[in-house]
């Protein structure tokens, strides 16, 4: 069990776990998950960590079918500029390896922005805390558990 699954269980929300064989040579983690699980790429969301300010981090949850709009996430966070965070810093701060970062159960609670497109689904898929493992839950439950705000931060 991962910290993400433990967090969902503790909250007693409705969710399901979906596992697949991760190919270690694949680097497009989200696309691989969507393909192997048979889930549309716009319903499977990736967890990205951005840096802003001197040492501040935030989480963006966007569909695999799109990209994070750095200007939009900066605006949503009320800052001038945001950039993708350093991989090692992400792993140290969240407790998860890149490609398996979950918005749930991170070591440190970071400000979280969930793309508004998530609201068009009754359930979305996000990493459950390791490569090859996804959790499916309602966008509202995810927002509640991570204290996320819905903002338009993805672009196609």
Image: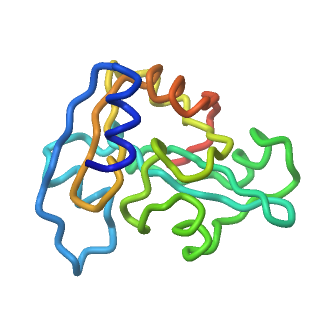
Q: Residue 26 occupies which quadrant of the picture?
A: bottom left
Percent from the top left, x then y, of residue 12?
Answer: 34, 19
Q: Is residue 14 above or below residue 110?
A: above
User: Picture coordinates of residue 110 (x, y %)?
Assistant: 65, 46
> Which residue does the image show at 51% across and 44% down from the upper left?
61
Relative side of 97 to 77, left or right = left
Answer left or right for 27 relative to 52: left
Locate residue 22 relative to residue 152 in the image: left or right: left
Q: In which quarter of the view is residue 9 placed?
A: top left
Q: Residue at x 88, y 53 (%)?
A: 80
The quadrant where residue 40 appears: top left
Q: Residue furthest bottom?
A: 25
Name which residue lies at 62% across and 42% down: 153
Please say if 89 is above or below 137: below
User: How is the protein colored in the picture?
Assistant: rainbow
**Residue beneath the point at 37% across and 23% down:** 138
25 to 120, vertically: above or below: below
Front position in the image: 119 or 89: 89
Q: How many marks?
A: 0
């Amino acid at each position: 069990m991962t910290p993400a699954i433990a967090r969902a269980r503790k909250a007693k929300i409705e969710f399901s776990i979906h596992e697949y064989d991760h190919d270690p040579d694949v680097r497009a983690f989200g696309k691989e998950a969507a393909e192997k699980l048979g889930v549309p790429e716009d319903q499977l969301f990736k967890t990205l960590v951005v840096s802003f300010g001197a040492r501040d981090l935030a989480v963006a949850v966007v569909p695999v079918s799109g990209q994070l709009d750095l200007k939009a996430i900066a605006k949503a966070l009320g800052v001038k500029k945001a950039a993708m965070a350093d991989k090692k810093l992400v792993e140290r701060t969240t407790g998860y390896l890149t490609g398996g970062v979950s918005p749930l159960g991170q070591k440190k609670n970071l400000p979280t922005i969930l793309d508004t497109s998530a609201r068009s689904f009754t359930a979305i898929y996000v990493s459950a805390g390791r490569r090859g493992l996804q959790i499916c839950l309602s966008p509202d439950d995810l927002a509640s558990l991570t204290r996320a705000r819905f903002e338009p931060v993805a672009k196609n």
